[in-house]
Amino acid sequence: EPLPPAPTSDAVLACHQGDAGACRAAGERLLQRKDPQAAMALYAKGCAAKDAACCAGAGVAADQLTLRTPTARNRQIALAWHDKACARKDAGGCHRAAAAVLVGGKDTGRAVRLALAACELGDCRDCRLLAGTLVSNLTAEQKQRVHGWLGSCPAETPAGR
C-alpha cells in the first residue's frame, strides 16, 4: 500500500505558527508515513497550544519510537506524553498512560487513578478493567462510580464477532 503524501509546507508552517489543527493533521500524515520522530515534533507544537489530541498523538508517536528502540528513556517519554494528554482530558491518553504504568508494575495506585480518569472520560476498556482485574484496588465509592459509568458502555461482544 503506497504511503500518503507528506504534509504540505503550508501545513507545517501553519503548525509552527500555532495552528494546532494543522499540527494534528500533519502529525497524522507523518505517522501514516512511518515517521514518528517528525510526527512527534509537530504534535508537540500542537500540544503546547493546549490541544489534547496533539498531546495524545505525541504519545502514540513516542510509543512507535519505543517499539523501534525499547529503552527505559523512550518509555518514560511516551508515558509523559500520555500523562499530558490525560491531564488535558483525552480518554485515550489516560488509557495508554494507565496501560504503561500497569506494564511497569510498580505503581498500581497511579494506574488505577489513570484508569479511573479514562473510564470517567468514556473509555469502556478501562471501566471494564476497573470492574474486573483492578476492582480490589477501588474504594466502595469508586466501585459505585465505575459501575455507573459502565452502564453507559455498550455490551462487550466476544472476540471475532
Image: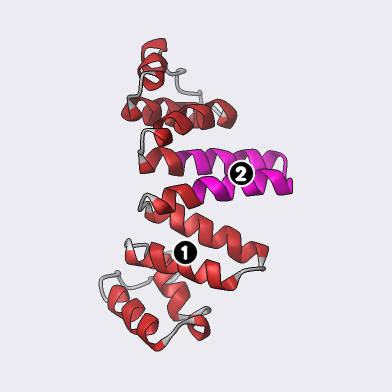
Classed neighbour count for the residue bearing mark 1: other residues with Cα under 10 Å, few (<14), some (14–19), many (≥20): many
Task: Examine the structure image and report whether residue 67 is included in the region drawn in magenta.
Answer: yes
Q: Which mark is residue 114?
A: 1
Task: Examine the structure image and report whether residue 81 is included in the region drawn in magenta.
Answer: yes
- Give the amino acid type for the residue marked by disc 1 in the picture: Leu
Q: Residue at x 36, y 12 (%)?
A: 10
Q: Which residue is drawn at 38% across and 80% down?
A: 142
- Give the amino acid type for the residue marked by disc 2 in the picture: Ile
Please state which of residues 74 and 17 is positioned toward the viewer in this rendering: 17
Secondary structure of the residue carrying numbered label 1: helix
Residue contact between numbered discs 2 and 1, judged by CB atoms under 8 Å: no
Check the image and report above or below for 109 versus 66: below
Secondary structure of the residue carrying numbered label 2: helix
Residue 53 quadrant: top left
Q: Residue under label 2, please give it.
A: 77
Please state which of residues 125 and 100 is positioned toward the viewer in this rendering: 100
- Left or right of 128 on screen, residue 70: right
Please state which of residues 141 and 67 is positioned toward the viewer in this rendering: 141
Q: Residue furthest top?
A: 9
Image location of residue 9, percent across then percent down: 42, 11
Image location of residue 77, percent across then percent down: 61, 44
Q: What stretch is highlighted in magenta?
A: 57-82
Image location of residue 111, percent across then percent down: 53, 67
As measured in the structure, the alpha-carbon distance from the residue carrying label 2 to the one carrying label 1 is 17 Å
Image location of residue 33, percent across then percent down: 52, 26
